[in-house]
Image (cartoon, rainbow, N blue to C red):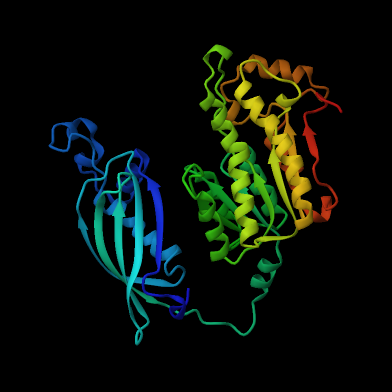
Amino acid sequence: MKYSEIEVGQKAEITHKLSSKDISKFVELTGDDNRLHVDEDFAKTTSYKKQVAHGMLGASFISTVIGTKLPGDGALWFSQNLEFLLPVRIGDTITVVAEVIKKYDRDEIIELSTNIFNQNRQQVTKGLAKVKIVNQVECLSDSTDEKKSKERKVALVLGASGGIGIETVKALIEQEWTVVAHFNSSSEALTKIKNQSTSNQLLLLKGNLNQPDFESVITDFLVRYDLKIDALIHALSAPIPTISVDQLEWTDYLTQLEINIKIPLLLIQKIISIDAFNDNASVVMISSQVVEQPSSNWSHYITSKSALQGFMKSMALDLAGKKIRVNQVSPSLTPTNLVSEIPQKFKLLTAAKTPLKRLATPQDIAQAIIFLADADKSGFITGETIRVNGGQVML
C-alpha cells in the first residue's frame, strides 16, 4: 500500500485463537519459560489460577496486521509502546485492531493505534505504533525468473497439509505451477517443500477456516501477491468418527456440511467478487466412494459427500457462464491420517477385493486432481466425477 493511498481512520484487523501450542512455540523461539506461562499446576498456586499467555505473544500479532494488511508489504515498523491491561489465556480469541490516527507527510510515516480485544470485547492490550512506508523501486524490465513466475498457472489448495493435499502440492510444483498452500496448524511438511522449491513457487497461507470472514483472509492474500487463480482445489477434511445412528447429533452433520459445502461456497463467491479467477479456471472437490458404496455408522460423512455431489453439479452449471469449470475426484479408501483408525485387516480385505489388488495412494488422487485442474488437459470437462478406485465401482 502506497503512502498516498492511506487515510486517517483506516482500519485493519486479524483474529486468532490462542492455543497451548502457540505458547510452546513462543517458548521454543524466545526461551521465556516462566512457569506462569507453561506450568498449569504452578499457575493454580498464583492469583491468576490459570496459565497466562506471554504478553508479547499476543502483541506479536500487531506485526502481522502491520506487515500484511495496514500498510502491508514494505512496512518498516520502527516504534511501538504497549500497555497490558488484562491477562490472555489459552483458549481466548484475540482480535488485533490497527487504526491510522496520524500521517507525517515529510517522511511518509503513519501512526497507528494498536489495540487487542478478547472474545468478550474486553481490551487486553493498548498501544501506539509508528510505521514508515518504504517505497518499492520499480524495475524497467522483469528478470527471466520473474517473467517465468508470472507465466505459471496458479493453484490455491485448501487443506494442503493433509495426505492428499501434500501430494497435490508436490505434483503441482513438479509441473511448474505457482501454489498457494493453505493450512490450519501443521506446516512442517509444507515448509520442507518450500525450502526445496524455487522462489515464490510455493506460498504458505495459514488460516482457520472456521473463523468468521475466513474467506477475506484468503482473498486478501491473493490481492497482496497480485494473484489470479487457475485452480481452486478443495482438499479440506474433518475427522470422521464412527457414530451409530442412536448416537448421532445434528452437529455431526453440520461439521461435515460446513467443510464440504459452506466453506467452498463462501470462498468461491468471494473470489468471484474480486475477479480473482482466470478464464477457464477450475474448481476441484474431493468426494468419496462411500457415496456409491456406503459404510455403516458414517451417515454424517456420507450425507455430506452426497450433498457435495449435488453442489458440484449445480455449481458447474451456474459458473459455466463465468468460464469456471467445477469437477470432483472420488477416491476409494486411501491411506492417510484421516482413515488411520480403520483396522489394518479391513484395509487388506479392501485391497484384496479391488480389481487392481491394492489401495489407492495419495499420489493416485493427486494426479487425477491435477488433470481436472489444468485447462490444457481438461478444458472441456465440467460437472464430472473421476473415480479413482482401482475398479471397485464402474459406471
- Residue 17, how many percent across, how many down? 38, 44
User: Is residue 329 visible to us here?
Assistant: yes
Residue at (78% x, 56% y) in the render? 321
Residue at image point 58% right, 82% down = 139
Residue at the far bottom in the pictured view: 106
Q: Is residue 372 visible?
A: no
Q: Position of residue 298 (x, y in %)?
A: 62, 20
Q: Is residue 77 above or below residue 247?
A: below
| Rendered residue at 48%/45% (across/down) | 208
Image location of residue 276, percent across then percent down: 65, 61
Give left or right: position of 102 versus 75.
left
For the residue pair 190 and 137, the one nearer the viewer reads as 137
Please give the count of numbered marks on the rendered protein. 0
Vertical comparison of 215 with 145: above or below: above
The C terminus: image quadrant: top right
Q: Nearer the viewer, residue 259 or 204?
A: 259
Q: Is residue 137 above or below residue 40?
A: below
Between 187 and 108, which is closer to the camera in this rendering?
Answer: 108
- The answer to which of 137 and 89 lies nearer the viewer is 89
Quarter of image, res 279: bottom right
Q: Tell me the residue at 34%/75% (across/down).
A: 110
102 lies above or below 279: below
Apparent side of residue 334 relative to residue 115 in the rendered image (left or right): right
From the viewer's perspective, tell me whether residue 264 is left or right of residue 59: right
Dividing the picture into quadrants, the one containing residue 261 is: top right
Residue 100 coordinates in the image, percent (x, y):
35, 70
